Image: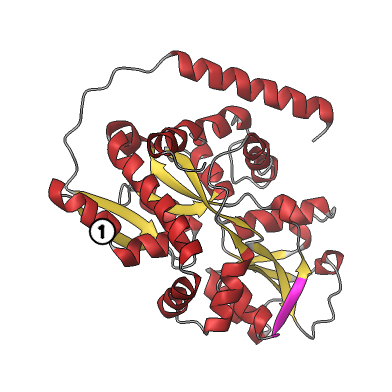
Amino acid sequence: MSSLHRAQFVRSISALAAGAALATPHRARAAAPTVLNIAFAYTVPTTLIVKEKGWLEEALKPRGINVNWILSLGSNKTLEFLRSRSADFGSAAASAGLLGRANGTPVKLLYFNLRGESTGLLTLINSPLKSIADLKGKKIAATRGTEPYIFTLRALQKAGISENDVEIVPLQHPDGRAALESGRVDAWAGLDPDLSIVLVEKRARFLYRDQSLITGGALFGREEFINENPDLTQLVLLEFDRARKYIHEHPDETNALYAKASDLDPAIAKAILARGDIDHPAIERADYERIAGAGPILKSSGAVPSDVDLVRTTRDLLAPSVYAKAAAAKALPA
C-alpha cells in the first residue's frame, strides 16, 4: 500500500469510527441467557486455561448461566458456529473474521488472543522445492476460510503467481499435514499444532514465511450477543486477561496442560507456546490496515463480493472499545 493510499485509508477509518461513536441506538434489554456458548481450540493457550480452570463456570453459576464449550477445528468452523448462533464467542484468525463479516456474518473482533508466526507454507524436508516460485504447477493443501488459506493467496500474489498457476487442495489442517507427509500435495499451509510437530520432528521445513501477511488470532463475538450482554462480554474478556497472567506465572503447568489437551509431546507443546505472543491483546491502529490488506486478494479470488467496502467492513469488524472498557474497569494492562 503506497504512502498516499495508507494515509487515505487511515483518514477513512478515523472518519468512520468517529461517525459510529456519534449514535448508539436504544435497545430493549434482552432476557439474560441461560447458556454461554464458546467455540474453542486447544491451540489457543488463553482459551485452554480459561476452559480447564473453570473460571467462567464459577463466575456464572450464581447467575444460573452454564458454559458450553464447542470444539472448533479451524477458523472456518468457528465462523460457522457464530453465524448459526451455535456459539456466542469463538477464536479465529482476524483475516477469517474479515471474510465472514464481508459475507454477512455479524461478528465483532474483540481481543487478540494469539499473535506471532502462526502459519507459513511448508514442504517436506527433502523436497526439491527451493522457493515459492517453484510452486507453479504444484498442489498446495490449505483450509478454505482460514488464516493459512488467506496467507497462501497473499503469498502467491506477492510472488507474482496466479492462483490458477497452482492447485489448492481444500483440506482441514490435520488432513493437510497428512497429505503433505504422504506426498499427495507438494506444500501445505500449516497451522499449529501440526505445523510445529513436523518442524520439531524435522519432517518438514518452511518453504515460505512472511509475518507481515499474518493478521493474528482473535476472540470474536456475535454482534447481537455483545450488544445485548455487555456485562457478560466484559466478564469473558476479563477471564481471558486473567489467563494471560496465569500463563506467565505458571509456565510449566501451562505447558503440561497444553501437551495433555492437544495430545502432544511436551517438547512440541513448549515449541508451540514459545512461538505465540499473548501479550498484545488490544486492537491497535496497525491492525486496521493489516486486516483490510487481506481484502483485495479475497475479492480477486471471488471469496468476497466485489462491491464490498473493505474499509467500512474492517471498521465494522473491529471493536477496540469493548476490551478497552473491560481493561479500564479492572485496571488491567491493555
Q: Is residue 67 shown left or right of residue 121? A: left
- Give the camera-side residue of 46 and 121: 46
User: Quadrant location of residue 56?
Assistant: bottom left
Q: Secondary structure at mark 1?
A: strand
Q: Residue at x 74, y 22 (%)?
A: 8
Q: Can residue 44 be seen in the rendering of this structure?
A: no
Quadrant where the N terminus is found in the figure: top right
Residue in the image at 50% along x and 34% along y: 320
Residues in magenta? 202-206
Q: Nearer the viewer, residue 144 or 42?
A: 42
| Visible residue check, residue 193 | yes
Provide the residue designation for mark 1: 68
Residue 229 x, y percent position in the rendering: 28, 36
Percent coordinates x, y for residue 142 in the rendering: 61, 65
Is 205 one of the magenta-colored residues? yes
**Residue at screen point 52% across, 15% down:** 19
Relative to 219, 141 lies left or right: right
Q: Residue at x 55, y 56 (%)?
A: 278
Q: Amino acid at mark 1?
A: Asn
Q: In the image, is residue 195 above or below residue 59?
A: below
Dominant SS in magenta: strand
Packing grade of label 1 (10 A; few <14, some 14-19, many >=20) is: some
- Where is residue 44 drawn, in percent x and y? 48, 62
| Res 201 → quadrant | bottom right
Residue 181 image offset from top left, x and y in percent? 65, 84
Q: Is residue 269 depicted above or below 283 in this figure?
A: below
Does the magenta portion include 75?
no
